[in-house]
Structures are given as C-alpha cells and as structure tokens.
Image: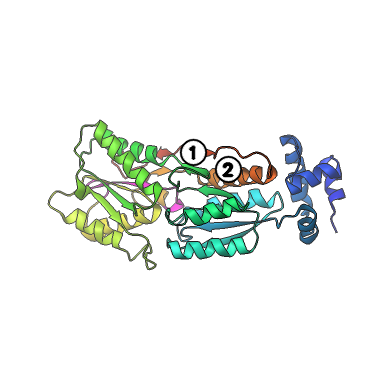
Amino acid sequence: MVTSKDVSTVAGVSRATVSHVINNSGYVSPELIRRVEAAIEQLNYRPHAIARSLAARKTFTVGVVVARLSSAFYPPLLSALESTLTRRGYTIVLCDSHEHAANEQRNLSVVAERRVDGIIWVPCSDKNVEFVRELAESGTAIVVVDRRIAGDEFDTVASDNENAGYIATKYLFDRGYRRIAIVTFSQTQASARERCDGYRRALGEAGVEIEDDLVCVVDDRDPNYSTDTNSAVERTVSLLRSKLRPQAIFACSDLLTLSVLEGTRRVGLRIPKDLAVLGFDHSPWTAFVDPPLSVVIQQTREMGAEAARILLRVLKRKGTRPRSPLLKLLPTRLIQRKSCGE
C-alpha cells in the first residue's frame, strides 16, 4: 500500500510538505506543489479519507451545482475543475439544476447537508442568492462560475461576455452585414444579458438602429429544451421567413447555434451565400460542419481550473480576516472559418 512516506521519497520532500499539499494547509512553494502532485499521480496515492477528515475537521468534498449538464459547455469545465480539486485530495458532489430555481435550491440544500467544505455554483438566476448568502455566512466557501450575480458579492470566475457579444457583432458588421440578428437565451441569466449588451454596443457604435425584431430571446428553461426540438428552431424559421430577414445571425450558445443551423436548413437558405452564421463555444462539431462555423470561444477549461484554485485558496485561509470578493473575467476570442463569407 502506498503511503505518504513513499510520496515524500519520490517527490524529494518531507512528509510534512506532502501533508500540507494534500490538506491545503501551510505555505508550500509552487515548485514543491508540482513535485508532490506529480508523485501522487505517479504512485496513484489515495489518502485515507476518514483519517484526513478527523485530523483536518473537513469533509474534503466540494459541491458543484450547475445549470444544465446537457450543454457542451460543461465537460471541459468540469474536467478541469475536478482534476484540480482531486490533486489536492478533494471529491466533488455534482448536481444539475436543469435551469430551474426550485431544483437549484434543492441541490444547494443537498450539498450543504453533506457538510461540503465549499460550493462551486453556476446560477440559474438571482433567485437563490439569499439562500447562498446564508450558506456563506455559516462558513461554506462559495465560488460563482460563468454567470455573474448582481453586485458580484461572491468570488466569481466568468467570461467577459459583454466583450464577446461586442466582438462577434463588430466582426459581422466589419464584413459588410447590416441586418444582424442575435439569437440568445433567457435574460434572467447574466451571461445572456451581457452578450446582448455587447451586441447593442457594437451596433450603437456603428450607428445602426437596433431593431427589436432582430433580438430573438428563447426561453431555454423548459425541461423539454433539447438540441433538436425547441422553440429556437421555430423562432429562427420565423425570423428567416420575415419580409426583412437578417443578413447574419449571431447565436449565443452551442445549443442555439445548432437550432439556428436547423432553422436555416428548414427554410432552404445556404450558409454563407444567403445567410452568415456566427456561433458560440468551441464544440468540436463546429469545425466539421459544411461550411465550418466561425465561432466566439471561451476559456472553458481555464474557467473550471481557476474556480477550483480560488476555492482552494479560500479554504486554506479559512478563519483569517475576510477580503473583498474576487472577480476574474476571462477573455474570449473569435475563430474565423467560413460561415460568414470568409
């Protein structure tokens, strides 16, 4: 059986250093942390959970409450988050809220009852902020991911969604498109509002009047919402059959991008000859459709890893003087392919 002594020997450090790395206690230099983590992985070392919990007065579990697991956004985020926490000896408890506030509160209650050391939370909306505030006040570490909460009162890691909407719309305008539609999701979600804000800013700077008919908001909170049968397809069809149909569409998520492609197919339009389409998120399929899709991508893996690192730092300094909430916005970037006439 592999022991912490074996880890210390392979890493070339003391057993105390191994203990500090595993329990996230005391200062250890980044170089020594890397050596210990490499030794743990090499030896497949697993500390005894019950002994660790009793010694550290922690459960070494983290609740992860997300909005909708069916989105392709989550696998890379959760993979990076889980691997970062696992290297420090933590296990995650994962819950899916399906974009419903009632489900979300139940999930938050479930992970809190398990006495998790912290919660990483992708909010459905602002409806459960008071409940999460109470959890934070009771000593549970909270990190918000992807969708900002009004006031940014918790540590938060998200994409710079306002700039994402801006660079997407400006790109389409700079390529000569003037009637640019946006297909977005529930405006109760901060990321959706921010992408719309960026869309409006880009058009405003260009002196283009914003037409309400070109702002297509889809309610993705329906439990039957899926990639192949949803209101986004029908909304896209209606948009493209209108008298003044758009010249370009910016779709604000991977699922909405699929819906726009299906709506375009049903109407019989060709991309990019009849319509430019700019998608969102770096789903692998976007590079292999015909034509390959231009997309705005997020640093999804970095978002998950950074959320985990922030939570670990909070748990490490627990009991010290509180500090102001941290807000980290990760930049997005645009990948040019062929769906916008490139």
Marker disc for residue 306:
2
Q: Are marks 1 and 2 in contact (CB under 8 Å)?
A: yes
Is 102 left or right of 168, judged from the image as shown? Answer: right
Is 41 left or right of 81, judged from the image as shown? Answer: right
Q: Residue furthest left?
A: 243
Q: Earlier in the sequence, mark 1 or mark 2?
A: 2
Counting from the top left corner in percent of width and height, residue 41 is at 74, 50
For the C terminus, which image quadrant? top left
Residue occupying image coordinates x 45% and y 42%: 151
Front residue (pair 289, 95): 95
**Which residue is labeled 1 in the image?**
330
SS type, badge 2:
helix
Counting from the top left corner in percent of width and height, residue 199 is at 30, 40
> Looking at the picture, which amino acid does disc 1 mark?
Leu
Q: Could you give the CA–CA distance between mark 1 and mark 2, rounded to whole angstroms?
A: 10 Å
Front residue (pair 283, 305): 305
Magenta stretch in the rendered image: 271-285
Counting from the top left corner in percent of width and height, residue 191 is at 40, 47
Q: Is residue 161 above or below residue 129?
A: above
